[in-house]
Image (cartoon, rainbow, N blue to C red):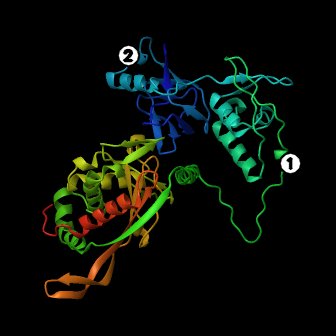
Amino acid sequence: MSLVDLVMPKLGESIMEATILKWHKKAGDPVSQDETILEIATDKVDSEVPSTAEGVIEEILFKENDVVPIGTVIAKIQTGAAGTGINQLPQAEQLLYEEAKLVEDIPYVPAAAVQNKSAAAKFYSPLVLNIASSEGVPLSALEQIQGTGQDGRVSKKDIIEYVASRKQSGYHSPAAEPQQKSNQQMVVMDQQPKQDDDRLPTTYSGNVEIIEMDRMRKMIAKHMIDSQNISAHVTSFAECDVSNMVWWREKMKKEFEKREGEKITFTPLFIEAIVKCIKKYPWLNSSVDGDKIIVKKDINIGMATAMPNGNLIVPVIKNADQLNLVGLTKKVNGLANASRNNKLKPDDTAGGTFTLTNVGTFGSIMGTPIINQPQVAIMAVGAIKKRPVVIETEQGDSIAIRHMMYISLSYDHRIIDGALGSTFLNAVAKELENFDGNRSI
């Protein structure tokens, strides 16, 4: 008999922890290799974790709603015979296991013990202590928080909610003057807390319904606020005549579906135009790191997608510049279907360098989108409407019914000035207006 460690897997670049949503197995349950054991969530996507071995669940080390660093052992599986541990797994599973164990940036650090003079020792993770230190939460206040983690431990979620409630109630902590300990101890602050627990709960007048935000909505809200705090948002607008594109799609959509087995929407046509213009103006495909501009050579286009529950997610088409129209269409449809059915993998939402959002899907004619960090620009396309417009012909100006659309570009004014932002926006508009109505599939 041998024990196999089940670790929190690596879930994509920049993701260092995940929340356990639901255990499908409990201690003592049999499990097959590749059978789903639990569901986890990050700030990008939900995912399932399969078993890396066949056997019996010996021990589960974390509870639901616990936030667990990548690479941490979360359960132990007892295999049926000696010598059938992780070293005997097939090569593919062995590589996955080793990758999960090798976290590049922040290794798991055991919870640090903080001694209380008047009570038994309590345990706080370095992450919780760092948040408490930066927000001016003294140890005496930290000890009053009711933890929801394992064994009543204060989790990241608990300390963030506590800090948010203090700010909402108007509490402002004095400047912290931490006492220096030895290098084996964490910094602990000794200020006396305000009487936060004595404050009155918020009341609402009138006929109201109170709805608690779900986890994803909270993440979206935080991401949007963070983006506005980070980037200097500016939005420019342009109008474009997409009649040629509309007529071409209408003419080709049945043949396209019959030949390729996919329905062609306007989204891959928009992405195709954006990619061409990014190649001309590469700064739109960059990010900012302090006083450095990181220009991305890979063009990975995120497409904002509404989910059935009303939340928003942004799957990413990797290396969009290397795909033809058929390839873009298949990628767009595949990611959209995976989003609607909650089948996205963590890597499907990672690595975006520029984002497209179609606000016209629900009837809006234009929008002012918020930049998807750490990107520096996001484009919104509005609803396509028939309108009478003045057009130039060889015989002179005339009025005609055309398919018109507004597009908008929000960009980070720290590095993208109005001249570059407007030039790029109008370049995309020209690409759409000059669409070749005689092109083949």
Cα separation between marks 1 and 2: 58 Å
Residue placed at 50% from the left, 52% from the top?
231
Q: Residue at x 67, y 23 (%)?
A: 112
Q: Give the mark nearest the N terminus, 1 or 2.
A: 2
The residue that disc 2 covers is 88
Residue 401, image quadrant:
bottom left
Residue 274 location, quadrant: bottom left
In the image, residue 377 lies at what x, y percent?
41, 54
Residue shown at the point (21%, 87%) measured from the top left: 397
**Is 349 situated above or below 71?**
below
Quarter holding residue 203:
bottom right
| Residue 204 percent coordinates (x, y) | 76, 65
Tell me if label 1 and label 2 are in contact, CB under 8 Å: no
- Look at the picture and state if 278 lies above or below 438: above
In the rendered image, the vertical position of residue 177 relative to residue 334, given as above or below: above
Between 163 and 305, which is closer to the camera in this rendering?
Answer: 163
Q: Secondary structure at mark 2?
A: helix
* Residue assigned mark 1: 198
The amino acid type found where label 1 is placed reads: Asp
Tell me residue 15's x, y (percent): 48, 37
Query: Would residue 167 be found to the left or right of residue 246 on screen?
Result: right
Residue 349 visible in rendering: no
Is residue 225 toward the left or the right of residue 4 in the image?
A: right
Crowding at dot 2, Cα within 10 Å, few <14 / some 14-19 / many 20+, comes out as few
Question: Is residue 297 among what the camera can see?
Answer: yes
Question: How many residues crowd mark 1 within 10 Å: few (<14), some (14–19), many (20+)?
Answer: few
Q: Nearer the viewer, mark 1 or mark 2?
A: 1
Q: Quadrant of the C terminus?
A: bottom left
Residue type indicated by callout 2: Gln
State the residue at coordinates (85%, 44%). Answer: 195
